Amino acid sequence: MITQLDMKYLRILFASLLVASLMPNVCNAQNPIIQTCYTADPAPMVYKDTLFLYTGHDEDGSKYFTMKNWRCFSTTDMVNWTDHGSPLGLNNFTWAKKDAWAGQCVFRNNKFYWYVPITKTTGGMAIGIGVSDRPTGPFKDALGHPLILNSQIDPTVFIDDDGQAYLYWGNPDLYYVKLNPDMISYSGEIVKVPLTNEGFGVRTGDPKRITQFEEAPWLCKRNKLYYMLYAAGGVPEHIAYSTSNSPTGPWVYRDAIMPRQGGSFTNHEGIIDYKGKSYFFYHSGALPGGGGFTRSVCVEEFKYNADGTIPIFNMTKEGVLNGVGHLNPYLRNEAETIAFESGIKTETSKEAGVYVTDINNGDYIKVRSVDFKKGAKSFQASVASATNGGKIEIYLDSLTGPLIGTCLVENTGGIQNWGTKNCTVSKQKGIHDLYLKFTSGNDLMFNFDWWKFSN
């Protein structure tokens, strides 16, 4: 996020036009990894065998950073992502007025703590904390009031090997505090980090800021070396990083690692290891209608250099080419578990939780790396329809691949009146990408909650 936008607005609009020509075309690829809504400011977290991704949510058609809630997604294979809806929003904080901007969630004390910046009802940005017993929420206000009150944004939280937790944040300055073990209070004074050229690089063309640091700090550690990644260089932003032998510095500037690309004048990074591989998350403006205020989260797999430095990334449409697992089709799979889709949206209800909706003729869902093992014989889907319904056509490997079955969806008596529909499928063995294509002469055919194959 950018602070003091009233003074920067013209510069931002110019930057938006400058990078728009670099926005990648949307195709049947992996990036952006979420296509059902606009997402921004990715914050990955590994808990047990699952990678959870916490994001902001740009409202459709936004002309500013119009953000009312945060969203959560998860994966166990890095190619299929399950939508868990919005477990935290402005309405969870009685002191919040607007601006559900970039946050980060961590696990400690058998609870999940989500640090988020919000504009207060009394004015000015503050950092609050959501807390939950589950990674997917629901979250509630841990304090009933802000933790940090110095009108700054973009919190990142890190727990060191010795148990000490640190909270960094900032734009245009960078600050940190040492969090107490309860994760909802801190000890000592707020420390303002010296933004020196040695620590954060040299910026040119802006007399008010002499270093590369702009916003979006992300603190992590690898092999005893501490990494501070951040959005850098002014608007439009690129991503750079510094390193230190201590979580509190002094920092040494290293390099820019992602150039200005992707149709969004801001960027916000998250970096993490999962199942033996390293991943770099960021956002772009790559979805239809996307731009500086309608962003979408992407991810790239990478390897650290031998000396521990981070290589340079370019934004790609392909994203993660090879996952770290296969999807089991014989378990109940949520319809909102998606590698790529066309046309659909997700919503939440008391009856079904998160489900797929806004299904029209020709829309589809792609699920990658599905292991059918010795072959399936039947398919079932939980659906709800108040119309004549439609069909779920089941293809393997592409929309022009083998059609192995067609599941007829009839009127279930209501758009939230859920029923299970079944069909036989021709036996296919091994690992395939799965395409569920929705066909009918009707618009808004039905809602779709989950699916499962049987053998």
Image: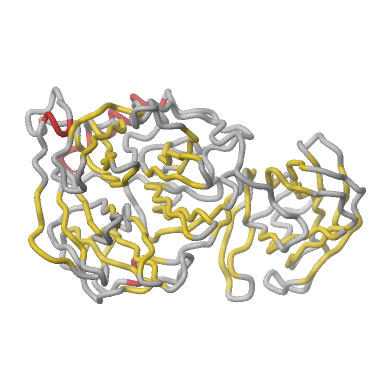
Q: Quadrant of residue 147?
A: bottom left
Residue 66 screen position, x and y as percent: 34, 52
Q: Which residue is drawn at 34% across and 68% down?
A: 130
Residue 87 screen position, x and y as percent: 45, 66
**Quarter of the rendering occupied by the C terminus:** bottom right
**Residue 145 left/right relative to 82:** left
Q: Residue at x 26, y 72 (%)?
A: 182
Q: Quadrant of residue 307?
A: top left
Task: Name the one closer to the observer, 402 or 156.
Answer: 156
Q: Which residue is drawn at 50% across and 53% down?
A: 51
Give above or below for 444 relative to 234. below
Asked if residue 55 shows in the view, the reply is yes
**Residue 319 left/right relative to 295:** right
Asked if residue 91 shows in the view, the reply is no
Residue 35 screen position, x and y as percent: 55, 45
Count of numbered circles on the image: 0
Q: In which quarter of the image is residue 332?
A: bottom right
Task: Name the one closer to the observer, 73 or 162.
Answer: 162
Task: Name the one closer to the observer, 294 or 261.
Answer: 261
Give above or below for 358 relative to 242. below
Task: Name the one closer to the observer, 157 or 114.
Answer: 157
